[in-house]
Structure formats: C-alpha cells, structure tokens
Image (tube, helix red, strand yellow):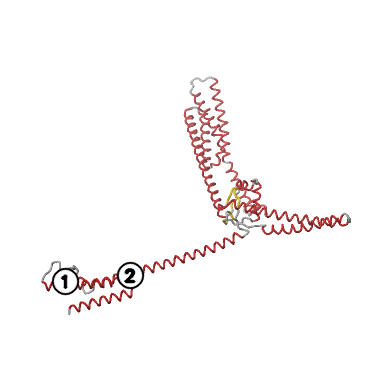
Amino acid sequence: MADNQLLNEIGEEIRDALKVGLSRGDFTALNDAILGSVNKVIDEATDQLERSTGYSGGPVNVSTHKYSSYSSGAATRAKQQQLEKEREERLKRNRERAAKNRREAEEKRIERAKARRDEAALRRKMKSPNAIILNGKLLPTKFKAIGDTGGVLSIVFGCVGLSLFGMLAIIFGIAATADASIKTSLFSVLLLAAFSGFWVGYGISLRKALERARKYARICGEKMYAGISQLASATGLSEYMVKKDIRKMLKKGYFPEGYMDEEGTTLMLSDSVYKDYMSMKNRQKADEAARLTQEEGSELDQMVEEGMAAVDKLHKLNDDIPGEVISRKLYVLEDLLKQMFSRVREHPEQMDRMHKLMDYYLPTMLKLVEAYAEYDKVSAPGSEILQAKSEIETTLDTINEAFTQLLNNLFQDSVWDVTSDAKVLTTMLTQEGLTQEAALKTQ
C-alpha cells in the first residue's frame, strides 16, 4: 500500500513537471523531479532493507538523501518557483533590451535621415551663386553674388551689339567712300558699337569684382576675418587698392555682415566676429585707460610728495633764518606752494602746468634759500655776502609774484566755467523777464 502511494506521488510530480516543461520550454523542473523520485525510491528500498535485516549504519545505506528531505515535493515546488522567477526576470531583461535596441535603431534612422537632408541642402547651397566653397567645403560666410547675372547679360548683349554694329560699321564705311551722305549713319553705328563695347567692359568688370570678393571670402576662411595685408599679398594688389575695393564691396552689399575696422587693417565677415573684435578693442582701451590712470596717479602722488617735502624743507630753513623781512616772504612762498599742490591733487589734469615748477623753479628756489641761510650765519658778513642776500630777497619777491600767477592759472579753467555759467544764467533770466534790466526794457 505504501509502495503504491509512493509511486502515485512520484508519478504526479513527474507529470506536473512535464506539463510545466512543455508549457514554458524549461525542463529543469522535470530533471529535478526525476532525480528526486529516484532518491525517494532508493530511500524507501534502504529503509525496507534495514527493517528486514535489522542492520543500520553500514555500507548498505547507499544514499545520504532521505525522502523526508523533500517533504512531499515541497523542495521541488520551491525550485520550480525560483526557476519561474528567474525566467520572468530573463524575459523582462530581454523585453527591455529589445525596447532599447528599437529606440537606438529609431534614433539612428532619424540621424541618417537628417544627415541625408543636410547633405541635400548643402548640395543645393553649393550650387547657389551665393555660396563660397573652399576645399570642397561650404564656408559659413554670408555672401551675395552681386553682378553674377548682370555681368553675364552685359557681356552677352554687349558682344551681340558689338558684332552687329561692328559689321554695320564696316559696311557703312565701305559705302561711305562712294557716297559721302552715309558718313552720318556711319558715325551713329560707330557710336552704338562703342556703347556695346562699354557694356562688354562693364560686364567683365562686374565678373572680376565678383571673383575678387569670392577670393577675399575664401582667404578669410572659417575664421571669418583676415588682415588687409594678407589680402593684398594673396591678390597681388596694394593695400591701398584692397582697402578701396573692400569699401566699395561693403557699400554694394557683397558681404551683408561684413565690416572693416576703423584703422583699416582687418576685414570681418560676420556680426559675431565683429562683436568679438569690438569687445577686444574695448577691453584694450579700458586696460590702456586704467594703465594711464594708474601712471597718472603714481605721477601725481610722486609730484605732491616731492612738493610737500620741498615745503617742509622751506619751513625748516625759514625757522633757521631770524630775519623778519625774509621770513614773511618765505611764509608767503610756503603758503603759495601748499595751495598749488592742494589744487593739483584735486585736479590732476593740471599736472602739465606744474612740470616746470618741479623741474627747475622749485629746486632753484630752495638752492637760493639754502644759500641765504648759510650767509645769514656769518657773524661779520662782507659786502659781497650782503649784496648776495639782498639779491636773494629781491628774487624771492619775483618768485612769489610768479607763483601767484601760476596759482591763478591753475584756477583759470574753473574761473572760465563759472563766468560762462553766470553769463548764461543772466541771459536766461533776462529772456524770461525775471531781472530788473528786462523790466526796464519792457517799459
């Protein structure tokens, strides 16, 4: 009875595992079920042998896997569930990989289509007369082939007219030898032939100008700019002629976004390049202005520092000289110098008027005062020393007068501005009838 039950259980497990394998294509569970069934049969046979012989623990125990370890197929079902879960995860990964491959394939298809459209558009642009080609590549330069069609038409119709009127001129010329009255018609035909020749020349000049413009653009290349000297060297023309030629082209519109800098040194063919160039120039100007300001500030500081050092030295010399007359003159001189250096510190633009003072007047003045102080220490001065001291005192009067004028000059611009403002204000008040003078005129 137990054997029949075991066989039935084994049969059901194998049948279930076979169904799972057939439905899902994975026969791992069937393999495990068969292996487990064999182990069950061996375990059952081993138990019966031990019961019948009463022997246990010897070599008869051919299997260490007991039927109880499977617990009625529970291990097999757990294995089946694990395998099912792994299979579902594999299917999920496969679906995700397939979706990713489809997306990548679609993106590549879109990229290829865009590349084909871009290539077709590039071919159309390269066939356009407004295209600039360099080494088989379309340059980004914005260009207008001005005179392309007009030049061709001028040459064609000019040649036709020149041929026609030239032949007529020959015919009329031969006929004019026999009949003088035809000379007037001959003159008219010659005039028309010359006019036709003019149109041929005009068309040729248009074509040459267009070719030069294309050459300028090709020399600029992808950088979108080139120096005038570079263009002149490449074309064999002088820089003057190149500048003149480019100015005409910019005026006519060959280069819609073209610019030439103020110095006439560089041709630029796009707004972005021109903006970058102007930004660079502005930075250079700002740096130069900052450098000049820094230099002027340093020069101003040095000037004021040296000037005030001279004032301090003059003050000490004045203290060493006991004479009241010269001391008053030195006090006036010291005050004038202080006012001048104070004015220059507030208005650095007045520094130019102080250079001669600093280079000659001030050092010479100090030298004279130092000599006076030395002479003044002589207890029994002779006539020469007394005369020298007298001349120095007179010179100090001249110096004070000159320095007073120099101080006035430092305020001159300010005085002019104030005077002008006062005159303008008075005029406006008079025109508005707000002054006594205006009231008297109305009466």
Image quadrant in which the N terminus is located: bottom left
In front of the other: 129 or 248: 129
Q: Residue furthest bottom?
A: 1
Residue 46 is labelled as: 1
Q: Please, is residue 29 above or below residue 181 in the view?
A: below
Earlier along the polypeptide chain: callout 2 or callout 1?
A: 1
Any part of residue 260 in sight: yes
Counting from the top left corner in percent of width and height, residue 323 is at 50, 27
Give the residue type at disc 2.
Arg
Q: Compute the Cα span from label 2 to label 1.
A: 37 Å
Image quadrant in which the C terminus is located: bottom right
In front of the other: 393 or 305: 305
Q: Residue at x 13, y 67 (%)?
A: 58
Any part of residue 422 in sight: no
Counting from the top left corner in percent of width and height, residue 107 is at 47, 65
Counting from the top left corner in percent of width and height, residue 391 is at 56, 26
Dot 2 alpha-carbon crowd within 10 angstroms: few under 14, some 14 to 19, many 20 or more: some
Q: Please, is residue 88 above or below residue 174 in the view?
A: below
Q: Please, is residue 24 above or below residue 360 in the view?
A: below
**Residue named by callout 2:** 87
